[in-house]
């Protein structure tokens, strides 16, 4: 059926940006207007090459001014850290911005840059929205969907469990402090710990959706397990006795009790490879609703009949935001949270796949 199309700009092409780029190239809903890259080796490369698809006839550029001047409906902005000045320029130029980089829900800690984003939306007559997987979906949209089935909510717990060796880039081993002395690790700032203000945005979204107020967000002491023997990985070895697993815990308090608890558990080893012998199982999101009725929901990748399973984390992250683009572009100007958008209605997802059978070929 005929459907409206949206001109989009892909801003950066890391793991999340590449997932978005592949979708824009394949989907009939989007027309790729420009691709902005940071790595000089990517400048001039065809967008299809960067996405791992056939060439599409559009070369990537690092010319920020030229991209900002490009006519487009929306920018999919995917750097790890948001540059608020750049996002405001994009908004002021009349382009909607959908991002995975932060500002998922208003909190006091981000009040000043949040006001700048709102002002830029008013100037450009456009909208801003942030989404992803966590923050941006598993810790906010998923709980708010699940609580619709509840008669009473006592506490919401989300476990993010990631096997780093199989389901994350290997550079996370160094970034996240694996291989460090345990005492040094638990006493120093951690990568996940630095992200607490952004996870807190998801907590506030859940609380606002439930009609209550968060009094404070607290962090428990980081727990770590050490390797019982050397653990080999493609980039080297994690030495025996060093950190091979970590468990972070953050709690949002409301009405004098813990209302929302996030657990972030990242592991290089498991079971007998660890001391203590943690075994959290496969990479997944485990959502537990304590209340009436007590309920559990699990989100994880699907193992195919041949036993293969590529963890879909980066695709989840990209599409959690990308699928909101039509609704964001069609909405009234402003900073649009999940609560503002309501039920997003993705477009262009149902389409013929390569090698799909005709109706007469189905059994």
Image (cartoon, rainbow, N blue to C red):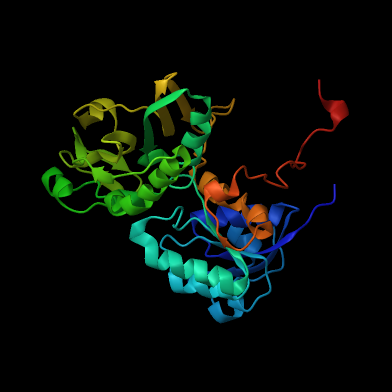
In the shown orientation, is residue 13 left or right of residue 110? right
Residue 115 placement (x, y as % from top left): 44, 67
Quadrant in which residue 244 is drawn: top left
The residue nearer to you, when weighing 256 against 147, is 256
Q: Can residue 49 be seen in this snapshot? A: yes
Quadrant in which residue 237 is drawn: top left
In the shown orientation, is residue 258 left or right of residue 136? left
Q: Residue at x 66, y 59 (%)?
A: 329
Q: Residue at the left extreme?
A: 183
User: Is 103 placed above or below 162 here?
Assistant: below
Quadrant into which the C terminus falls: top right
In the shown orientation, is residue 80 left or right of residue 357? left
Q: Residue at the bottom extreme?
A: 65
Residue 178 placement (x, y as % from top left): 25, 46
Residue 168 placement (x, y as % from top left): 41, 45
The residue nearer to you, when weighing 337 against 87, is 337
Q: Can residue 170 be seen in this snapshot? A: no
Residue 297 placement (x, y as % from top left): 47, 26
User: Is 170 placed above or below 62 here?
Assistant: above
Numbered circles on residues, count: 0
The residue nearer to you, when weighing 85 against 67, is 85
Q: Residue at x 53, y 46 (%)?
A: 339
User: Is 269 placed above or below 332 here?
Assistant: above
Q: Residue at x 47, y 35 (%)?
A: 143
């Amino acid at each position: 059926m005929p459907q409206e199309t949206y001109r989009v700009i892909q801003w950066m092409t890391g793991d999340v940006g590449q997932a978005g780029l592949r979708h824009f190239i394949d989907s009939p809903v989007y027309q790729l207007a420009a691709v902005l890259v940071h790595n000089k080796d990517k400048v001039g490369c065809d967008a299809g090459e960067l996405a791992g698809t056939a060439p599409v006839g559009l070369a990537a550029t690092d010319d920020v001014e030229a991209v900002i001047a490009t006519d487009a409906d929306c920018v999919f902005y995917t750097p790890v850290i948001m540059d608020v000045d750049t996002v405001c320029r994009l908004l002021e130029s009349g382009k909607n911005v959908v991002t995975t980089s932060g500002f998922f829900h208003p909190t006091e800690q981000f009040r000043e840059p949040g006001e700048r984003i709102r002002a830029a939306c008013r100037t450009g007559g456009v909208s801003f929205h942030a989404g992803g997987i966590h923050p941006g979906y598993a810790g906010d949209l998923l709980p708010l969907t699940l609580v619709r089935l509840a008669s009473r909510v006592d506490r919401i717990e989300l476990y993010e469990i990631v096997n780093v060796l199989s389901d994350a880039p290997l550079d996370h081993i160094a970034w996240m402090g694996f291989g460090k002395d345990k005492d040094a690790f638990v006493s120093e700032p951690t990568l996940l710990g630095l992200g607490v203000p952004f996870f807190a945005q998801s907590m506030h979204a859940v609380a606002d959706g439930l009609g209550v107020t968060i009094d404070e967000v607290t962090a428990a002491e980081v727990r770590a397990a050490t390797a019982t023997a050397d653990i080999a990985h493609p980039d080297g070895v994690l030495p025996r006795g060093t950190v091979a697993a970590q468990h972070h815990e953050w709690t949002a308090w409301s009405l004098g009790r813990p209302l929302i608890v996030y657990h972030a558990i990242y592991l290089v080893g498991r079971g007998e490879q660890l001391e203590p012998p943690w075994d959290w199982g496969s990479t997944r999101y485990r959502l537990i609703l304590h209340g009436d009725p007590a309920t559990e929901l699990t989100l994880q990748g699907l193992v195919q009949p041949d036993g293969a399973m590529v963890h879909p984390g980066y695709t989840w992250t990209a599409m959690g935001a990308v699928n909101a683009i039509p609704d964001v572009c069609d909405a009234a100007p402003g900073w649009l949270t999940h609560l503002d958008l309501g039920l997003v209605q993705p477009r262009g997802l149902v389409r013929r796949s390569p090698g799909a059978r005709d109706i007469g070929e189905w059994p």
